[in-house]
Image (cartoon, rainbow, N blue to C red):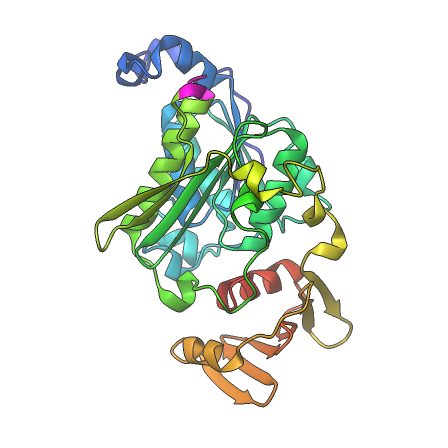
Amino acid sequence: MPGMPQLVSPDVTGQNKGGYMRDRYSRQTLFEGIGPEGQARLARSTVAVIGCGALGAIQIESLARAGVGSLRLIDRDFVDESNLQRQIMFEEQDAIDRLPKAMACQRRVARINADVHVEAIVGDLHFANIEEHVGGVDLVMDGTDNFETRFLINDVCIKRGIPWIYGAAVGAYGLTMNVIPGRTPCLRCVLDSPPPPGTSPTCDTAGVILPIISIVASVQVTEALKLLAGRLDDLRDTLLQIDVWRGTFHQVKLSGLREQANCPACRHGRFEYLEAEQRQLAVGLCGRNAVHIAQPGVFKLDLQALADKLHALGEVTLKPYLLTFRVGDQELNLFEDGHCIIKGTTDVGFARGLYAKYVGN
């Protein structure tokens, strides 16, 4: 369609056009942690960024400016006005145009560094396509906003031997850790299973400020540069906890945790989140303009607590065993076992995004 960005930007050779930007990376190569050899390794690297929102936006811009040769951007959402406060890749026109986030990031990277090859994948990441989407990459960056996807990333990266860097931020608090298959504990060593929906705060229920996003994403990018430049001995081996409002930084040592946790993924090779029956199930309801989402496992959702969080964000009606939340043109009908009927859409990916945004997983 005329005027629409291509899904894949034109391939580039990585050579400076006419030599006019031969000094682009001069300050970075002067830093002994990178150097000319490390810079050359960056140019040969391919990184997948899963989630192009708050954390992902900073990761993408930083990696592009650093000269990482190829970026694969994966996101199911479009730019909304509420994103502009914290998602630095996006501009007001992107929100007006409701441009898919991956494509908006691709367009901006083309303006930042034309030497970087960018592939934009607009769609829902799930068990059936994640192995294809991370195929051939050197590193996966976590820019997601829900545990379901993170556990999926953990499984596929452990299975394929791909390093990935976990990150999360909400309010003024953030976490990050490196997962290097065969060298470090994985996410399931630290957290055996995702917390039930409604029990963890999200940016849409607890808010978030840009400084914590910037700090967590910058730490993630620093670790990425170490890894891609071949400085494996310099990688951090801790879970880093940051509260930027209180000004506290705390590191939790992870050595020995893999053995103690007896992890099903990195110790026993069982990748349960790559199996359909272990993930959130979603299906369109024929003729109803609605999507049904069901959670695996057995738990009880605290509807009252969730209703209290959502009151400021839309219209909430709470009845025994059912919470109805209306926001925009959509209506979320939540039940105690975590299953939900989302009215006003037949787009499964969009419905998943709403569920993750307001329920938390």
Question: What residue occupies the far bottom of the structure in this picture?
Answer: 319
Q: Quadrant of residue 280?
A: bottom right
Which quarter of the image is occupied by the N terminus?
top right
Q: Residue placed at 26% from the left, 17% from the top?
A: 27
Question: What residue occupies the far right of the structure in this picture?
Answer: 286
Q: Is residue 198 magenta?
A: no
Q: Is residue 19 left or right of residue 227?
A: left
Residue closest to the eye, 210 or 261: 261
Residues drawn in magenta: 228-233
Q: Quadrant of residue 96?
A: bottom left
Residue closest to the eye, 134 or 180: 180
Q: Is residue 6 visible?
A: no
194 relative to 20, above or below: below
223 relative to 13, above or below: below
Q: Is residue 232 magenta?
A: yes
Which quarter of the image is occupied by the C terminus?
bottom right
Q: Position of residue 143 (x, y in %)?
A: 47, 45
Q: Quadrant of residue 10?
A: top right
Q: Is residue 8 visible?
A: yes
Q: Is residue 74 left or right of residue 130?
A: left
Q: Is residue 21 left or right of residue 126?
A: left
Q: Position of residue 78 (x, y in %)?
A: 50, 55
266 relative to 324, above or below: above
Q: Residue placed at 73% from the left, 65% from the top?
A: 283
Q: Position of residue 244 (x, y in %)?
A: 25, 51
Q: Residue placed at 31% from the left, 48% from the top?
A: 242
Residue closest to the eye, 185 or 329: 185
